[in-house]
Image (spheres, grey):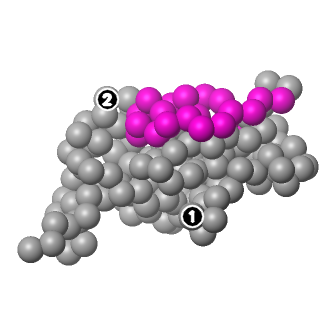
């Protein structure tokens, strides 16, 4: 992912050793949509020449970075339009390449995401590790939202 060429643009913390970095063709629209649909909080937004050069969202205090790396970038949804293998490996409802986010209330989160136009890949379901659902964002990145299983 290309930001602006300066490492100082990345505001990382030692508390989070792994930070997802996602690319979007329209990073500005994606950032706004992710806030609306998934309830993330905006932390940093840097726009240069009409493109999102660096964005940071918070999901329950965890950092997610996003940007528009170049005008030639295309997200997973656009790529599937002309790539048969990508269509095939994304035919399943699972998170092929994506991000898992823990949330307090899967049902409420699912309702919010569905209302904002997220592509729902699987309805909320109980699993051995908690209740979850899967969704795709406006450019086809896949997300899994999980409420941790309550300890008995």
Residue 40 circle label = none
24 part of magenta stretch: yes
Q: CA distance from mark 1 to mark 2?
A: 30 Å
Q: Of helix, strand and loop, which one carries label 1?
A: loop
Mark 2 Cα shell of 10 Å, populated few (<14), some (14-19), many (≥20): few
- For the point 36% across and 57% down, which residue is it? 102
Q: Earlier in the sequence, mark 1 or mark 2?
A: 1
SS label for mark 2? helix
* Span highlighted in magenta in the image: 23-48
**The label number, if any, that marks residue 115 in the structure image:** 2
The image's mark for residue 16 is 1
**For the view shown, which residue lies furthest in the left direction?**
152
Q: Position of residue 46 (x, y in %)?
A: 75, 33
Residue 53 locus on image (x, y percent): 78, 38
Q: Residue at 25% across / 64% down in the picture?
A: 148
The answer to whether residue 71 is magenta is no
Farthest residue toward the right? 5
Q: Is residue 49 above or below residue 34?
A: above
Question: In the rendered view, does 39 fall on the left or right side of 108?
Answer: right
Which residue extends farthest front? 14
Vertical arrangement, residue 60 with respect to residue 118, above or below: below
CB atoms at circles 1 and 2 under 8 Å apart? Answer: no
Q: Residue 50: image x %, image y %?
A: 79, 24
Any part of residue 8 in sight = yes
Q: Position of residue 10 (x, y in %)?
A: 75, 51
Judge left or right: residue 50 versus residue 15: right
Q: Is residue 88 visible?
A: no
């Amino acid at each position: 992912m290309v930001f602006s060429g300066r490492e100082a643009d990345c505001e990382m913390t030692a508390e989070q050793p792994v930070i997802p970095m996602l690319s979007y063709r329209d990073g500005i629209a994606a950032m706004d949509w992710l806030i609306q649909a998934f309830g993330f909080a905006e932390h940093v937004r840097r726009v240069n020449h009409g493109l999102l050069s660096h964005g940071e969202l918070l999901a329950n205090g965890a950092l997610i970075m996003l940007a528009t790396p170049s005008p030639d970038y295309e997200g997973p949804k656009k790529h599937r339009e002309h790539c048969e293998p990508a269509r095939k490996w994304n035919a399943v409802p699972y998170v092929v390449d994506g991000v898992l986010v823990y949330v307090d209330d899967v049902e409420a989160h699912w309702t919010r995401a569905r209302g904002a136009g997220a592509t729902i890949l699987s309805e909320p379901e109980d699993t051995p590790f908690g209740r979850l659902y899967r969704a795709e964002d406006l450019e086809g990145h896949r997300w899994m939202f999980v409420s941790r299983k309550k300890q008995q």
